[in-house]
Image (tube, rainbow, N blue to C red):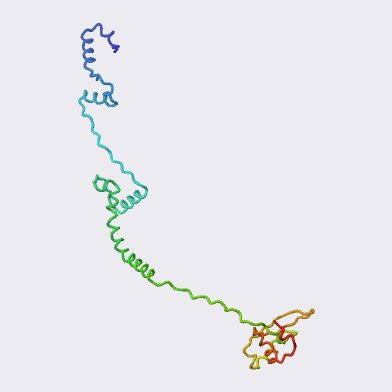
Amino acid sequence: MALPGCGAAEGDRQSFQAMAERVAAIDIPLDPKAIGPGAASRQTAQAQGLRPAKFSPVHVAVLTPHQMWDARDVLSRGGSLALAEDKSEDGLRGAVTRMAEPAVEPALRAAAPVVARAMVEQAVARSEPPKLRPAVVGAGPRAEGRMVQLGAYSSRAGAQAAWTQLKARASLSNLSPVFEGVEVNGRSLTRLKVGPIPVEAASALCAAAQVADPWCRRAG
């Protein structure tokens, strides 16, 4: 260790002796690890007769965005947030929970009848027998037989007039007419047909309609 003031103190033996004593009084620990960042400041404070400051740990509460919004609502209603340490619920989260409990309980009581009614409706819906859709009855098979042509007319009106006269007879009153438009040798005709009827009844039908042409029995 160099003493830059030694040369200046050669003429004054007492001053040099006093400086040497002050240097010897400096406490230098043998363990280098014992010298921490705040060791010098603590030694200086003790040398000056000052009492070292004591620091207490700072508690930092980490909140989610939802918890921050809840805390803001509590403060806006004039409430206070107790940040004191609690064994069951700590910090701001516990304060928000305690402020929200008085409002949650009435809401739960008000919602209880609605929830119960919904559960009853669901139970009734499950207990009701399923509603069956009416079966669609398809058309039955077409009656056996064939269509019998009673005549061919130059217009549909002529065919309808002829059927009006023919259906007055008892043997033809229960039949339904069919008016079929065709073109034969460049001429537009309307055929009057009835049926379907069994093949063996075609001759009797032609006789009842007083149609003697052979195509009446052959029409299909």
Asked if residue 13 lies left or right of residue 108, the reply is left
Tell me what residue is drawn at x 26 percent, y 37 percent.
Answer: 57
Q: Position of residue 34 (x, y in %)?
A: 26, 24
Q: Position of residue 32 (x, y in %)?
A: 28, 21
**Rendered view: 91 above or below 113:** above
Compared to residue 66, the image places residue 16 above or below, namely: above
The image quarter containing residue 4 is: top left
Locate residue 4 relative to residue 13 in the image: left or right.
Answer: right
Q: Residue at x 22, y 14 (%)?
A: 24
- Residue 186 horizontal side relative to residue 201, left or right: right
Asked which quadrant contains residue 207, the reply is: bottom right
Q: Give percent across and percent down for residue 197.
A: 64, 85
Q: Quadrant of the N terminus?
A: top left
Q: Would residue 190 appear left or right of 68 to someone viewing this image?
A: right
Residue 184, horizontal then vertical, whole percent: 77, 80
- Which residue corresponds to the image point at 23% horizontal and 33% vertical from the top-left? 54
Q: Is residue 210 visible?
A: yes
- Residue 201 occupies quadrant: bottom right
Seen from the viewer's position, the closer of residues 43 and 107 is 107
